[in-house]
Amino acid sequence: MEQHKLVRIPVILKGPNYITWSRLTRTALGGRGLWEHITTSREFDTLDVISPASQDYNIYMLEILPPKYKMYVETCMDKMEPIGKCGLYVIKEILTNEPVSRECCLKVVRAGKECFIETNKLMFQFYQLKRFVSQVSFKINEVWNRCSAEVESPSSSADFAI
């Protein structure tokens, strides 16, 4: 017979401490092999769901960022303009391994590696994506490496004009 043990999280969820609470919860449940019961394989399909609570979280998260960092990320995003749907496709590649187009890779590489990484780190702080944050740092680098290799290959050098 299967034994069920009480899982205690040492922090009580109180809005602004969500990040700390969620990390402790993920660690506590993951350490007992229970995290897969919380997450599903259809998670990418729910990324566009926005509730008033998630909007409040996103607004708060952006408000507490240091002004210099916000300005830096905005400059990075300007370098990738017009990123358009490519931003969503990059996130989709990070989460599902579905490669973005060469055109999107050109926009990514145009901004530079540091900008690409910082912009995606910020994207994965938003409410809809934060549950993936522990899984994506390696994937962000993989996407960068694939795109930069594709753009810098001899067959595509003529496509990359800044």
Image (spheres, rainbow, N blue to C red):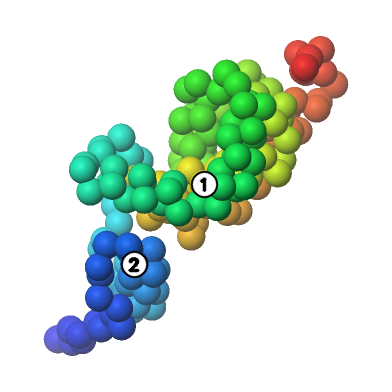
Tell which tag, 2 or 1, sits nearer the viewer.
2
Instruction: Identify the element where label 2 is drawn.
Output: loop
Residue that numbered label 2 is attached to = 17
x then y, percent, for residue 139: 58, 48
Q: Quadrant of the N terminus?
A: bottom left
- Residue 55 vertical position relative to residue 136 in the rendered view, above or below: above
Residue that numbered label 1 is attached to = 122
Q: Identify the residue shown where x is 85% and y is 21%.
A: 154
Q: How many marks?
A: 2
Q: Quadrant of the C terminus?
A: top right
Mark 2, residues whose alpha carbon is within 10 Å: few (<14), some, or many (≥20)? few
Can the viewer see residue 82 in this picture?
A: yes
Choose between 60 and 79: the one closer to the eye. 60
x then y, percent, for residue 103: 63, 18
x then y, percent, for residue 82: 57, 18
How far is the residue under mark 2 from the one under mark 1? 18 Å
- Residue 45 vertical position relative to residue 81 in the rendered view, above or below: below
x then y, percent, for residue 64: 45, 54
